[in-house]
Amino acid sequence: MPVATLSRWTMAFFAAALLMLAVAEAFMVAGIGYPAAGLLAPESLIVVHVVVIGWLSLAMAGALLQFVPVLVLHPLVFSQFALPALSVLTGGLILLVAGFSTLAGWTTWSLDLLPLGGLLLAAGFAMLVIILGATVVVGGFGQPFARFVLLGLICLSGTVASGLAFTFVLAGRSDWLASANLLPAGVPFHALLGVGGWLGVTAFGVAYRLFSMFLLAPDPSRRRVLAVLVTAAAALLAIGVGLAALLAGLEPGDLLLMLAVSGLAVAAALHGRDIFTLYRARHRKGLEINMRSSIGATAALMLGMALLPPAVIFGAAESVVVALAFLLVFGWLSGLTLAQLVKIVSFMTWLEAYGELIGRVRTPQVSDLVPMPRTAAWLVLHFAGVAAGALALAAGAAGTFRLAMLVCLAGTIGLIAELVRVRRLCQVEPARRPPADARPRIFLPPRSHRRQADGPFPAVRSSGRPRA
């Protein structure tokens, strides 16, 4: 069995990401951004970037720092850049939001904050691409799921490059882009490359590995996984061609956009088929809360991607397209992330607290760290808020949407509280907790006098396996 390892800064990425999610939902509850403002209004761009960069991208980065070594069976390369990447990304997002606030008329700060924030974000994401990309390359491409990560990192690079160009245009510093036709024509391509490519395709690869691991199910056949990868890559290539045409001053038209959305929908359908096959073939008959909630997230993916191509091709109302995008971002990506965070955080906490005690003392099970009924209730609140919010957006009911986001915010705050309790081992009997100075810290790495977190922990024996 492979030696279990812990990423030093994954919990810090998760903590920052959850804080950003709560901030974004609070903005929406307050009526900031769409539908109270236009879809491309600065207020809406603030909310979108806090969600996509601050919440989803940081959470994805934290998860990849932990699981890419598992995918390729090789330790992280350049892992010392993880904390600088988090710091630079957080600072870049703050500057980007400050620049958008000037565009919105909230502040009188310089618009140069936009490209400055963009440059910091580019630097932070470049560090992540180097860490994760180098690990995948050094570990080899034998593991098919790692190829999804590599494709996602390529899409991340394109998303960051196009977004950086947008910031120069918005700040009036785009003389070097005089021949380009980026705004507003490039926004759909930029969004698809980021959400569909970086976040979506990477989520496909991570989900394959996590679902087979947590369900105790055999991996899907390489042929099926390759079909998903090739289909998604073809769709993303169409997006790249569209962005390249805009940079050259050409007008790609709607055909490439329609092809890209349709291709991603086919890839999502193939992926969803594989996920439900994993559920049927599982050896773990009793589903844990993270896997039950992931059914709802996968259903949101299937519904959203089934309806989005017809909505785009037949010119549905903006409110309908936005509602479907919201369902994908909050129902699938956010729902899947929140559900799996419960398991990931509890498992990493178990390893950190008890990994060195395996075989010497009787340790709690991983499930003993999580208050299941309360955690399930918070996840139900999230999905209920998402369903109500998507319907409200489609109907153009701004007030109802704000109430729906209040439900989502309540679920997020509740989950954050439960994850803090997990880290503090509140559910474990006091007599079975490690000494106070050896317990996990909420989001900081283990104390220096303990074994290094990026180093190996003892291999888990069959008799002491961390069962759920």
Image (cartoon, grey):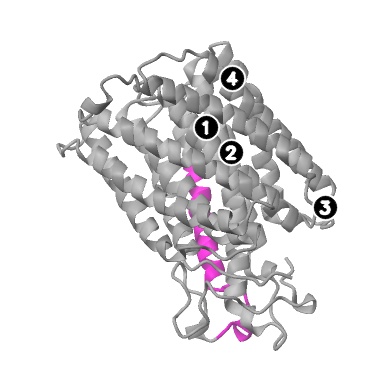
Whether 425 is among the magenta residues is yes
Residue 172 in which image quadrant: top left
Residue 48, above or below 141: above
User: Which of labels 4 and 3 is toward the front?
Assistant: 4
Q: Which mark is residue 326?
A: 1
Q: Disc 2 designates what residue?
A: 331
User: Which of labels 4 and 2 is toward the front?
Assistant: 4
Q: Secondary structure at mark 1?
A: helix
| Secondary structure character of the magenta stretch overall | helix
Q: Residue, x 47% and y 47% (percent of image)?
A: 57
Q: Amino acid at mark 3?
A: Arg
- Among the two numbered marks 4 and 3 on one chain, the one whose residue lies closer to the N terminus: 4
Q: Disc 3 designates what residue?
A: 282
| Marks 4 and 1 in Cβ contact (< 8 Å) | no
- Please indicate, yes or no, whether residue 302 appears anywhere in the rendered image: no
Residue 429 located left or right of residue 10: right
Q: Amino acid at mark 2?
A: Gly
Q: Which mark is residue 259?
A: 4
Q: Residue, x 49% and y 48% (percent of image)?
A: 410
| The C terminus sits in image quarter | bottom right
| Marks 1 and 2 in Cβ contact (< 8 Å) | yes
Q: Which mark is residue 430?
A: none
Q: Within 10 angstroms of label 4, few (less than 14), some, or many (20 or more) residues? A: some
Q: Within 10 angstroms of label 3, few (less than 14), some, or many (20 or more) residues? A: some
- Among the two numbered marks 3 and 1 on one chain, the one whose residue lies closer to the N terminus: 3
Q: Along the line of sight, which residue is nearer the eye, 6 or 348?
A: 6
Q: How far from the left and from the top, in percent, is residue 241?
A: 49, 24
Tell me how far mark 4 sits from mark 1, CA to CA: 21 Å
